[in-house]
Amino acid sequence: MAVDEVVTFPMMGGDGTCSYAHNSQFQRGTVDAAKELVREAIVNKLDVGSYGYDNSYTVRIADLGCSVGPNTFISVQNIIEALEFKFQNLSLPVPDFQVFFNDHTENDFNTLFRTLPPRKYYAAGVPGSFHGRLFPKSTLHVVNSFNAMHWLSKTPKVNMLEKSLEWNQGSIKCTRFMKGVHETFQAQFRSDFESILNARAEELVPGGLMVFSLITGPSGIPFADTVQGATYNFLGSCLWDLAKMGVISEEKARTFNVPAYFPYVEELESLIQRNGHFAMERMQQLDQPMRHKTFPAQFYLSHLRAVLEGLIGKHFGEELLENIFNHINTKEAEILSIHNGKLHKEIEVFVVLKRISKN
Ligand SMILES: C[S@@+](CC[C@H](N)C(=O)[O-])C[C@H]1O[C@@H](n2cnc3c(N)ncnc32)[C@H](O)[C@@H]1O
């Protein structure tokens, strides 16, 4: 399988009305739904027994794919509170905490650090891809990652992608639904996820934890029948409209793709088992409160924009962003029918992995 260049697609930076910081309440729902589970994992599963507890002891935490607050600050705070509780409960001195905020280099780290809340930890930024090594060997105690690891390291190249938006009896069909294309994205995810696990296995101390959420596809349901699949189709049809209106080129519309993959839970489980560096301490579906609610069309549209604006701007040119999103924003009825209809919703899964002793 040939691959093209590594893609980076930061969420919308800054703290303006279109920013990720103001349009990530949905993702916040995942962080909140996992709060107690994170606490349980830290309190019951993190090994602290084998380290020294002198005054120089530091617990290091990394948040991978942090974007810009507030969600990253909230999930880090949940970990810090759980760690404080754990050490106090063990009648051990509370150590220093150091938190590394990681994202692509193009992430808006300036806004991230400008908006850091009052905190009981030392903060540092670590730019770079979590698909590779980011930290020295055996230096991290807890790795945290919410709503991020479905992003691929690159868009896999398949010939069929040249027809990625196919004109078909008056409606756009996303080629992601075609078997060969789906399998190519699946293979890319498998390789990327393996790289994530291998890198973290090097960086975590034995007994250290990796806690993360991942959006997964409902078992046995084709991507085309899910909310996410329908959203891809929706996006494709908007881009096709814009091509017909002469705002963007057909060629550009045809070659646009979103480098993300939503694995089935069983797929995720078998990748973790095959990797072999981690004990699976927990894998469970999150009761994400935001998935039970209905919202006005503009809520969904602004969340979509905050996530995809960077990617769309890179592909079509930033000067076209306003035209593109002005058109997408007129499609209120369509986006509502996707979210309020009978399509299958994605399932958010929470996972706790413990680094097993290195040999
Ligand atoms: C939807 S945001 C999630 C932000 C935050 N964790 C939350 O839950 O709200 C996904 C983030 O993952 C980042 N990301 C995607 N691929 C990445 C990679 N390979 N390395 C580092 N960050 C990545 C994106 O830039 C983006 O900021």
Image: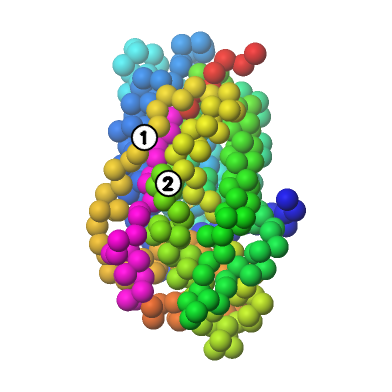
The tag on residue 51 is: none
233 vs 81, nearest the viewer: 233
Q: Which residue is mark 1?
A: 284
Kind of residue sitting beneath label 2: Gly
Is residue 314 placed above or below 97 in the rendered structure?
below
Q: Position of residue 139 (x, y in %)?
A: 59, 26
Q: Residues within 10 Å of mark 2 (few under 14, many from 20)?
A: few
Q: Find numbered disc 1 in the image and state the secondary structure of the residue it sits on.
A: strand
Q: Amino acid at mark 1?
A: Gln
Q: In this view of the protein, can residue 352 be seen by the observer?
A: yes
Which residue is painted at 32% across and 37% down in the image? 35
Q: Which mark is residue 220?
A: 2
The magenta stretch spans residue 159: no
User: Split into 4 quadrants, where in the image is the C terminus?
Assistant: top right
Q: Earlier in the sequence, mark 1 or mark 2?
A: 2
Q: Residue at x 53, y 76 (%)?
A: 168
Q: Position of residue 140 (x, y in %)?
A: 55, 28
Furthest-left residue in this view: 293
Whether the residue carrying mark 1 lies under 8 Å from ligand 1 is answered with no
The location of residue 209, given as percent across then percent down, is 48, 26
Above or below 313: residue 121? above
User: Mark 1 or mark 2: which is in front?
Assistant: 2
User: Which residue is depicted at the point 48% across and 81% down?
Assistant: 170
Magenta stretch, residue numbers: 332-352
